[in-house]
Amino acid sequence: MQLKTILNRVQKFTSFVYGAVRWVDSASVPTLEVQIHARVNSRPLCGQCGRRRPGYDTLPERRFEFIPMWGNKVFFVYAPRRVSCPCCGIRVERMPWVAGKHRLTDTYAWFLAGWAKRLSWHEVAEAFRTSWDHVFDSVERAVAWGRAHQDLSGVIAIGIDEIAWQRGHRYLTLVYQIDADCKRLLWIGEKRTVKTLLRFFRWFGTARNQALQFICSDMWKPYLKVIARKAGTAVHILDRYHIMTHLSKAIDEVRAHEARELKEKGYEPVLTKTRWLLLKRPEHLTDTQETRLADLLRYNLRSIRSYLLKEEFQLFWRYTSPYWAGQFLDRWCTRTMRSKLDPMKRVAKMLRRHRPLLLNWFRAKKQFSSGIVEGFNTKAKLTTRKAYGFRTYHAVEIALYHALGALPAPKTAHKFF
Ligand SMILES: [Zn+2]
């Protein structure tokens, strides 16, 4: 069987035929070149408008990389024609194996992009003996195609989250669709300002903004402002995950402060290795950790009191009636305000200020659990962290859309992957 026969089976073109296949002697890696010819008497398509036009001239041969086979690199070699198009002028013809001026065929780019969902970009480059730039280029093409072809209709609920990147110096705003039947990353913006979120709503469009019924977000002021302005009819829910994160941070602050104080006074450092004990849910503790926590609870420390306040607050989420949840919230805030624990008091003040939004969660019948945004947050952090080489914002953006966007791909893209 000839290689041509295999190629015709996996990727057949109507107006082009495969010609001679030859080894490239000078290449460092075993390399095959497959000649491609235009069918005799076929007229080229204009690369701009796609219409059949008379030929103008022929350019020198170009090489387009295809999926490697059995350890051999494979290139298509073709001399593109130029057309004389009455609408577009002199243009390079359209070639069905590649869009635009790329050096990788579309098939190979989809192949690499597919693997880049499972492996890091470095691993993909290594496995297929190609460069990081080629992998990046492939993922970028897949993301561009997917974003241009994605269906944005019927989005009812969104979650807004932010993550830090570049060692916490910069922030990204991420907007997710969190409907029961469709969860995906919709949009990414640099920073977490009023302008950032305004850009999302502008991109999403007025009609779709007005169709939003639920929006989950943190108590971050710029977000609150923009949401009220742009999607006023939606029920705005402060999500549980972020609220509990604020409480954990407050506990950590109390503990760190107290640990320093105890050390200065020469007491045994009871609090130095207990950070995780206080932040973990009791049901997630190991046996040894449980014993340590029991030891710790014997001291009437500020850290312990803030820990108990946070544990008590978990009860809030068990309510079903917004009214009784509100009563609980008020009592909890009053007690916390009397606790003399400044970081905890700050959280209580914040919760009081946003009481109606907090209770919206119960009005929305708890259908948006904290797990959705939290799960996405973890995945997004993992994507940016494992991404060695993502120095630019653009690369992070592409990586996140690729990993979390649930973007569509053309049917042919799945043939080789
Ligand atoms: Zn044209």
Image: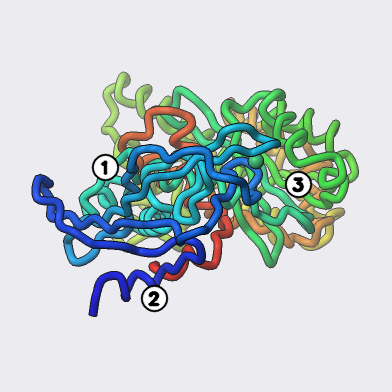
Which residue occupies the extreme top position in the image? 264
Q: Nearer the viewer, mark 2 or mark 3?
A: 2
Disc 1 target residue: 131
- Residue 312 appears left or right of 21: right
Q: Residue at x 71, y 30 (%)?
A: 199
Would you place residue 164 above or below residue 8 in this image?
above
Q: Residue at x 63, y 51 (%)?
A: 52
- Quarter of the picture containing the N terminus is bottom left
Disc 3 target residue: 215
Disc 2 target residue: 9
- Rendering quadrant holding ligand 1: top right
Helix, strand or loop at disc 2? helix
Tell me which amino acid carries mark 2: Arg
Q: Which numbered disc flags the more N-terminal residue, 2 or 1?
A: 2
Mark 3 and mark 1: span between their CA atoms? 41 Å
What numbered label is drawn on residue 142? Answer: none
- Residue 33 appears left or right of 348: left
Q: Which numbered disc flags the more N-terminal residue, 3 or 1?
A: 1
Helix, strand or loop at disc 1? loop
User: Can you give x and y, in whole percent of width and height, for residue 151 in the image?
Assistant: 70, 56
Circle 3 residues within 10 Å: few <14, some 14–19, many ≥20 = many
Any part of residue 46 in sight: yes
Q: Return the residue nearer the eye: 308 or 325.
A: 325
Tell me which amino acid carries mark 1: Ser
Q: Which numbered disc flags the more N-terminal residue, 2 or 3?
A: 2
